[in-house]
Image (cartoon, rainbow, N blue to C red):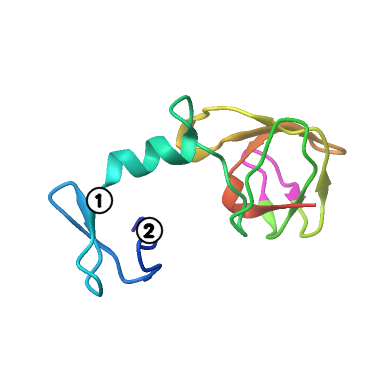
C-alpha cells in the first residue's frame, strides 16, 4: 500500500484517495494526486528519497540499513555497509540506485533500504 502525502493545508497525516483526488478528512481540503507528483519532481523526474525521506542525488554516499541477500549468490550486503558514488536510475522492480559495492561488485538497490550518510 502506498504512503499518501500529508495535507498541504493542515499537515494532517490522515489523507485518503477518492477518484483521483487526495482528500483531508480534518479540513476537507482536496487536491490532485498528479499535481503533487509534479511539484515533488519539478516536472522532470520523480525525486528519489531514502528510508528517512531525505532526497538523494547522483554521487551521494549512502549506508545500507538492512541485510540484503544478493540474488544468484550466497553473498549478503551487511547492515552499515557504505556505498559511495551512487547513480540514480529508473531501474526495473523499484531498484532506483545503481552502485558498486566493494567485495560484491555492481548492483542495483532500492532506495527504501538505504539512508544518506
The quarter of the rendered structure image containing the N terminus is bottom left
Q: Give the magenta-colored segment's residue range.
A: 69-76
Circle 1 residues within 10 Å: few <14, some 14–19, many ≥20: some
| Horizontal relation, residue 21 to residue 45: left or right | left
* Residue nearer the viewer, 54 or 32: 32
The residue identified by callout 1 is 31
Instruction: Give SS at disc 1.
Output: strand
Question: Is the stretch drawn in magenta largely helix, strand or loop?
Answer: loop
Q: Which residue is outermost to the bottom?
A: 26
Instruction: Locate residue 66 relative to residue 49 in the image: left or right.
Output: right
| Residue 100: percent from left, percent from top | 78, 32
Q: Is residue 72 magenta?
A: yes
What's the mark number on residue 8? 2
Magenta residue check for 48? no
Could you tell me residue 75's position as x and y percent? 75, 47
Identify the image quadrant of residue 7: bottom left
Where is residue 95 shown, x and y percent of the image? 55, 37
From the viewer's perspective, is residue 59 above or below residue 20? above
Q: How many marks overall?
A: 2
Q: Is there a contact, CB below 8 Å, between mark 2 and mark 1?
A: yes
Earlier-in-chain disc, 2 versus 1: 2
Question: In this orientation, which residue lies closer to the viewer: 45 or 107?
Answer: 45
**Residues under labels 2 and 1: Cα distance?**
9 Å
Give 69 or 39, whichever is nearer the viewer.
39
User: Secondary structure under badge 2?
Assistant: loop
Label for residue 23?
A: none
- Where residue 3 sits in the image (x, y, percent)? 39, 59
Residue pushed farthest right? Answer: 102
Residue found at the far top of this picture: 44
- At 56% across and 40% down in the image, what residue appears? 48
Q: Residue at x 36, y 71 (%)?
A: 12
Amino acid at each position: 500500500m502506498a504512503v499518501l502525502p500529508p495535507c498541504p493545508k493542515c499537515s494532517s497525516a490522515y489523507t485518503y484517495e477518492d477518484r483521483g483526488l487526495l482528500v483531508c478528512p480534518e479540513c476537507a481540503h482536496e487536491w490532485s494526486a498528479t499535481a503533487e507528483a509534479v511539484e515533488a519532481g519539478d516536472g522532470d523526474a520523480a525525486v528519489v528519497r531514502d528510508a528517512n525521506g531525505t532526497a538523494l542525488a547522483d554521487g551521494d554516499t549512502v549506508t545500507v540499513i538492512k541485510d540484503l541477500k544478493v540474488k544468484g549468490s550466497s553473498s549478503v550486503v551487511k547492515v552499515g555497509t557504505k556505498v559511495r558514488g551512487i547513480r540514480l536510475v529508473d531501474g526495473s522492480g523499484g531498484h532506483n540506485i545503481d552502485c558498486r559495492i566493494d567485495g560484491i561488485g555492481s548492483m542495483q538497490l532500492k532506495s527504501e533500504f538505504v539512508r544518506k550518510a
